[in-house]
Image (tube, rainbow, N blue to C red):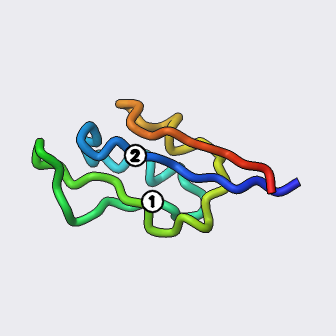
Amino acid sequence: MAVKGTIVIDNEMCKGCGVCITGCPNEVIALGKKVNQKGYNYLEIINEDACIGCANCAILCPDGVITVYRAKI
């Protein structure tokens, strides 16, 4: 059974450390060019259709700003 995933990022809490990017097997996320109110470049979804909901990004995030959702398709 296939699984479709998606993530929600709390942009205002993201520090842009990039640790989560290394754990994404499908290159779904990257640091964006925009900055949040704290002055950090925050995480952006660049390839949402490739997300499998593995939660590697959420597990690696030191600040817990990523929420993962999965749906069976």
Identify the residue at image location x=64%, y=52%.
5
Identify the residue at image location x=80%, y=57%.
73
**Could you tell me how far apart the alpha carbons at marks 2 and 1 are, in whole angstroms?**
10 Å
| Nearest-to-viewer mark from 2 and 1 | 2
Q: Position of residue 33 (x, y in %)?
A: 22, 66
Residue at which label 2 appears: 9
SS category of the residue bearing label 1: strand
- Residue 39 left/right relative to 53: left
How many numbered marks, from 0 up? Answer: 2
Q: Residue furthest top?
A: 63
Query: Which of these two is toward me, 15 or 48?
Result: 48
Query: Which of these two is toward me, 27 or 65?
Result: 65
Residue at which label 1 appears: 29
- Residue 33 left/right relative to 65: left
Q: Position of residue 4 (x, y in %)?
A: 70, 56
SS category of the residue bearing label 2: strand
Question: Mark 1 packing: few (<14 Cα in 10 Å), some, or many (20+)?
Answer: many
- The correct choice, above or below, for 26 with respect to 12 in the image is below
Q: Position of residue 39 (x, y in %)?
A: 10, 48
* Picture quadrant of residue 65: top left
Identify the residue at image location x=51%, y=49%.
7
> Residue 43 got which mark?
none
Identify the residue at image location x=28%, y=63%.
32
Q: Position of residue 49 (x, y in %)?
A: 60, 67
Kind of residue at badge 1:
Ile
Lower sequence index among marks 2 and 1? 2
Q: Are marks 2 and 1 in contact (CB under 8 Å)?
A: yes
